[in-house]
Each structure stands twice: as structure tokens, then as C-alpha cells.
């Protein structure tokens, strides 16, 4: 049983046909238009499996196109608005605390700081509410890349010193 059913208006139908016939639109847009025309209840609607096989899609993709059209109408052909990026979790202050911890003496009984121990210490000091060991690794890797000292007489390219 088809979950998302619709009847295209004559204007929508003409717009979809124009999109296909011009051939100037992106391939995905043309494919969406073809699926929507084949799914139209105003004319003889084809089965999902037949549409999927005809346009080399999965039945799930056909369902998704129908669902999007039922929810957004012809706006499915507009680009999706991107979600605004959330504020960065790793600030300069947090980075400084993390590096200070990593450069300090390791906990008693340990020969070096473990990533999880650094993350736990940041939470303990109430620098952040929570922090993962992978984020610690990312910051340390980025910092190491930035602050890698040159060897005496070495070049930035990493080749042998010039004479």
C-alpha cells in the first residue's frame, strides 16, 4: 500500500514535464520529476517497484521523493536550507587548558597522560561540562601540527639543510 499519494495539478504537471524536456536541470531534479509524474494519482499511477526499476532507484528512494513532495510540494526542487552550524565547542581558552594539562606532570602511577584522563581533568576543573577523548586527540594533533619546531638547519619543506 502506497503511503504518500497525491494528484498533480495541471500547472504542476506542466512544470514537471518542462523540467524533463528542457534537460537543463540537474540529473537528480529530472529524476525526481520523472518519479513524481509516474506517481501521479490523477493519471494511471505506476507501482513503486516499477518506478524504481524504470529510473534505476531503490523503492525507498521513490518513497522518499513522494514523501518530500507531499510535505513540501514543488519546493522539493529548491535546495535544502542548511542547518546553521552550532558554536564551536573548542575555544582558545579550552585549548590552552588542555595543552597545559597535557604538558603538566601525569597523574600518580602513570608514565604519561592518557587522552581520557585529560578529558576527565577538564571536566573536573569545570572548564567544560563534558569532553571526549577523541576531541582531546584532535586538539593535540592540530596543536602539534601548528607548533612543530624546525630542527636546527632544517627547512620548512623537510629536506636536507642547504649548504
Image: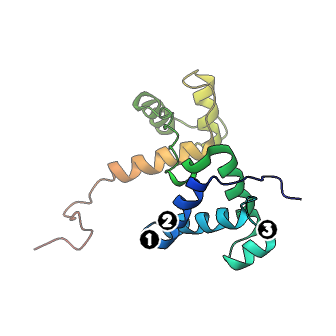
Q: Label 3, label 1: how many angstroms apart (C-alpha)? A: 25 Å
**Is residue 72 rendered to the left or right of residue 141?**
right
Of residue 101 and residue 157, the one placed in the foreground of this image is 157
> Total marks drawn?
3
Q: Which residue corresponds to the image point at 49% horizontal and 65% vertical from the top-left?
A: 19
Residue at the image position 47 percent from the left and 30 percent from the top: 94
Residue at the limit of the structure toward the front, as seen here: 10
Task: State the residue position of label 3.
Answer: 48
Residue 22 is tagged as 1
Identified at 33% across, 53% down, the residue is: 148
Q: Residues within 10 Å of mark 3 (few under 14, many from 20)?
A: many
- The image quadrant that residue 49 belongs to is bottom right
Q: Which mark is residue 19?
A: 2
**Nearest to N terminus: mark 3 or mark 1:** 1
Secondary structure of residue under mark 2: helix
Above or below, 153 relative to 53: above
Tell us which disc is closer to us: 3 or 1: 1
Mark 2 neighbour density, 10 Å: few (under 14) some (14–19) many (20 or more) = some
Tell me if I can see residue 7 in this picture.
yes
- Labelled pair 2, 1 in contact (Cβ < 8 Å): yes
Amino acid at each position: 500500500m502506497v503511503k504518500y499519494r497525491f494528484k498533480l495539478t495541471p500547472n504542476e504537471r506542466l512544470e514537471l514535464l518542462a523540467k524533463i524536456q528542457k534537460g537543463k536541470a540537474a540529473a537528480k531534479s529530472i529524476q525526481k520529476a520523472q518519479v513524481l509524474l509516474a506517481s501521479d494519482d490523477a493519471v494511471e499511477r505506476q507501482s513503486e517497484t516499477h518506478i524504481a526499476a524504470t529510473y534505476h532507484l531503490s523503492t525507498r528512494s521513490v518513497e522518499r521523493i513522494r514523501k518530500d513532495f507531499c510535505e513540501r510540494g514543488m519546493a522539493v526542487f529548491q535546495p535544502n536550507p542548511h542547518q546553521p552550524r552550532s558554536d564551536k565547542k573548542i575555544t582558545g581558552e579550552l585549548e590552552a587548558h588542555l595543552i597545559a594539562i597535557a604538558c603538566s606532570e601525569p597523574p600518580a602511577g602513570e608514565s604519561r597522560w592518557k587522552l581520557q584522563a585529560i578529558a576527565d581533568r577538564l571536566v573536573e576543573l569545570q572548564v567544560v561540562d563534558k569532553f571526549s577523548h577523541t576531541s582531546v586527540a584532535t586538539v593535540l594533533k592540530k596543536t602539534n601540527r601548528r607548533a612543530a619546531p624546525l630542527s636546527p638547519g632544517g627547512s620548512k619543506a623537510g629536506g636536507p639543510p642547504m649548504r
